[in-house]
Image (cartoon, rainbow, N blue to C red):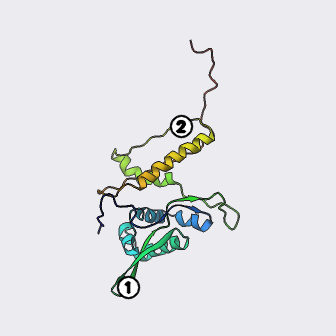
């Protein structure tokens, strides 16, 4: 059953860090599973029990409990409150942070960097029904800019993501928001302009 909160109530309904750096291979592997990323997405809205999460994702409670345990042991989820129901203590889980980012020093035991999940692969799968229904809003742009300008622009995008995360939850539709900034090594470029070519 949805919990109704005032329009301007904080999202989510528990305390958490703004950012958390993931520095171990175990942490990166923990978030690199589609079901776990869905669980993390649901907990952006409010804390939830394993039973509530299992109902939301349509998976067995034992399966969801396993994934919640993996995320909790990795320090990505935390118990934010408990409630006693008929002599059983229910745990409500929440994210450890609004945003997780993979630290540059991450390495596995074999010295290899673990693969983070590709947000665009997830977005392709999620957005297909919206595309088919003519409801997908998207842009792709390319700009040849210095690295420091790219970093500056990404800070603006980060602020926009934070704003999206803070929107009060209401209505019956969940919207996806995917952004990325990436270098393209083989994108074509024009030759230098000829100063005398403009007449």
Nearest the camera: 79 or 34?
79
Quadrant containing the N terminus in the rendered view: bottom left
Query: Can the viewer see residue 178 in this picture?
Result: no
Can you give x and y, in whole percent of width and height, for residue 117 in the image?
Answer: 54, 58
**Vertical order, 146 against 179 (above or below):** above
Mark before the other along the chain sequence, 1 or 2: 1
Say which quarter of the image contains residue 93. bottom left
Q: Nearer the viewer, mark 1 or mark 2?
A: 1
Q: Which residue is mark 2?
A: 142
Mark 1 and mark 2: Cα distance apart in space: 55 Å
Residue at 65% x, 60% y: name it. 113
Can you give x and y, in whole percent of width and height, for residue 66 in the image?
Answer: 48, 75
Nearest the camera: 79 or 186?
79
Can you give x and y, in whole percent of width and height, for residue 94 in the image?
Answer: 44, 69
Residue 88 numbered mark, or none: 1
Most extreme residue toward the right, as rendered?
111
Residue at 30% x, 67% y: name it. 3
Can you give x and y, in whole percent of width and height, for residue 106 in the image?
Answer: 65, 61
The answer to whether marks 1 and 2 mark residues whose Cβ atoms lie closer than 8 Å is no
Q: Badge 1: how crowded within 10 Å, few (<14), some, or many (20+)?
A: few
**Vertical order, 61 against 46 (above or below):** below
């Amino acid at each position: 059953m949805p919990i109704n909160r005032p329009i301007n109530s904080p999202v989510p309904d528990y305390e958490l860090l703004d950012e958390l750096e993931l520095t171990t291979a175990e942490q990166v592997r923990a978030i690199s599973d589609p079901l776990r990323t869905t669980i993390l997405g649901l907990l952006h809205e409010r804390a939830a029990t394993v039973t509530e999460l299992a109902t939301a994702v349509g998976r067995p409670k034992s399966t969801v409990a396993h994934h919640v345990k993996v995320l909790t042991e990795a320090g990505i989820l935390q118990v934010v409150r408990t409630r006693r129901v008929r002599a059983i203590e229910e745990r409500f889980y929440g994210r450890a942070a609004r945003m997780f980012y993979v630290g540059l020093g991450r390495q596995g035991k074999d010295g290899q960097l673990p693969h983070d999940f590709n947000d665009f692969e997830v977005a392709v799968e999620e957005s297909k029904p919206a595309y088919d229904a003519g409801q997908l809003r998207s842009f792709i742009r390319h700009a040849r800019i210095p690295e420091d300008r790219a970093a500056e622009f990404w800070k603006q995008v980060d602020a926009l993501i934070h704003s999206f995360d803070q929107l009060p939850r209401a209505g019956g539709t969940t919207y996806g928001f995917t952004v990325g900034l990436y270098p393209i090594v083989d994108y074509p470029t024009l030759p230098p302009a000829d100063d005398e070519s403009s007449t």
